[in-house]
Image (spheres, grey):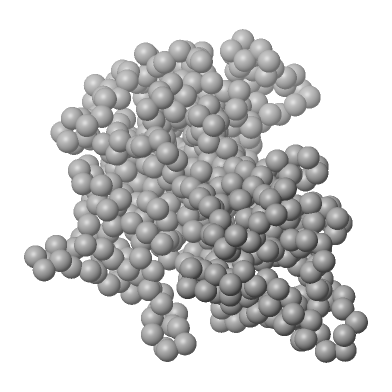
Amino acid sequence: MVPKIRRGSRTHGLLVYLYGPGKRDEHTDPHLVGSWDGFAPDPGRDTNPDPKVTLARLAAALDLRVKQAGDKAPAEHVWHCSVRTDPGDRPLTDAEWSTVARRLVHTVNLAPEGDPDGCRWVAVRHADDHIHILATMVRGDLRRPRMNYDFKKAQAECRRIEQEMGLRRLKPGDGTGARTPTSAERFKAERTGRPETPRETLREAVRQAVAGAASEAEFFTRLREAGLRVKLRHAPSGDVLGYTVALPGDRNRNHEPVWFAGSTLAPDLSYPKIQTRLADGTPDAVTVPEGDSGRSDWSPPAQGRRAATEIAERAAIRLDSDDDAAAQLVGIGELLDAVAKTSPAATRADLRAAARTFERATRSHVRAEHADMRAIRSAARGIIQAGSALGRGEDGGTTAMLVSTLVLVALAAARWHSARGHAQQAEASRQTAEHLRAAYHQAAAAPMQALRDQGRALPEAQRRTYETTIRAALPENSTRPDTDTKNDALAATLAQAEQAGHDPKTLLQEAIDMRELDTAENVNDLLVWRLRRLAHLPAHPGDAARHPQAGTGRAKSAANQPDVRTAQQAATRPAAPDPRNRPPRR
């Protein structure tokens, strides 16, 4: 049940709308379901042949105290609250809606129960799923009602009503959400054939522009390169004070561009918040993971995704073990925006949905120390600079590798928020995980099928050896090789790792010990990607022929491969741990 509150100054005009056909003939059978005294005239049920007369009588009755108060009445004396149930909820009766209206005007102090001087109000129903409450904000003693925090109080009361009436229970808000598009914006988008409102399009574009940006100048350049109109506000000294953006072609009735300030798109997109995020700059982008620097024939997008996977794994560990991890969420939001912006067509829709949903999880009342997210912002920058992935071969495999890890990060974020009572952010994190899982299934289909084929092609004796290794390490995941093929891809990966000079048992245990596996939808898939990253194997098995010496021994790799991290990175984040000293399994 969602309350939406507005204030205005035209009682009669609002009643005309509520009892009219609506903007698109969506109003049916408008009538009162409640009023301040139970005897208010109802234009929808009155037998008068001219309903306008009854409507004028109702407006006059509502405005009586306003006129008596004269100059002491507020300029915007109309309190308008629409209350809507969830699409999956049962239709409420008129009596139930009357109860809802009375409880809301009581809880916001408009018309407290038992107060004869309460404000005058009516509740109009013209659809199955919602009502409109109209009240005039002058009491019977001609004083104004005290209505501090009316929206929060209405929200809290709706949560109680949901529980008592058996409706879907929504998450309580905390004032950190982005502003939703207005009805006028949605109607305009429909008229102009846009799939979404300009506000939503601009919000995503600004988020993607700030992802991994190293400076304000780069941020504004990215906005313009994205095709947005950008206008900067300067102080007399020439310093930038703020910015506004507009979509080309989006104009108002005066044919002027419709500008949005960053703060009206989302709280964290205001110019001061972006300044704070960019204040310390960003390290040079990392596009080649340690141990893979000799793989120059892998595409830049594949290299960037491999680097991001390791950093995302660290972020998940941090979220599970550190109370002060709010900055990790902001950084993961940037990483998701970067991946969505450069994703191949097959996964683009799901990854964009994941990035948009997780945006809600990046904001809470826990203040983020942005210096802690430099490594994640560096990974986002590397992905942006590497450009778009093609979605096949090594690009597709590394996309699956990264998205598999991001699912665990989203679930870790859900646990982090739940532990702090952030209901909306926790729910957004869980929804993000579902979008990421859908993207993963798309990205992993080809490489996992190729690995399963390779696993089934192994000699029977070799295959049984790897099955024994898997059953010993994961007894709860054991299967009979002659009845189930779910270990095929894992067996193929262990075979390739052994060919590259690794000990299969040691490497598998290392992958298991990296962190918990309980939240993984498919433990085998997760371990495949961890193993291929630890052993520096191609993410797409079809590329193995081009890399016959992939990851020949970790000791050899560590000795011969240069550390590609910059001195600045080394100073701002801990050195990568030795793979043999991974954190124990949680």
Q: Is residue 378 left or right of residue 434?
A: left
Given residues 24 and 82, the one toward you in this image is: 82
Given residues 107 and 81, the one toward you in this image is: 107
> In the figure, 579 relative to 567: above or below?
above
Q: Quadrant of residue 473?
A: top right
Q: Position of residue 263 (x, y in %)?
A: 37, 59
Q: Quadrant of residue 452?
A: top right
Q: Tell me the residue at 78%/86% (across/down).
A: 53
Task: Point out the residue furthest to the top here.
Answer: 472
> In the figure, 398 relative to 252: above or below?
above
Q: Is residue 359 visible?
A: yes
Q: Tell me the residue at 38%/85% (across/down).
A: 256
Q: Position of residue 559 (x, y in %)?
A: 24, 21
Task: Point out the residue furthest to the right here.
Answer: 47
> In the figure, 578 relative to 354: above or below?
above
Q: Is residue 23 left or right of residue 256?
A: right
Q: Is residue 174 left or right of residue 485?
A: left
Given residues 109 and 553, the one toward you in this image is: 109
Q: Position of residue 373 (x, y in %)?
A: 32, 37
Q: Tell me the residue at 37%/14% (across/down).
A: 580
Q: Position of residue 521 (x, y in %)?
A: 64, 32
Task: Point out the residue furthest to the left here.
Answer: 237
Q: Exactly how many numbered labels are in the figure?
A: 0
Q: Tell me the residue at 71%/48% (across/down).
A: 113
Q: Is residue 301 visible?
A: no
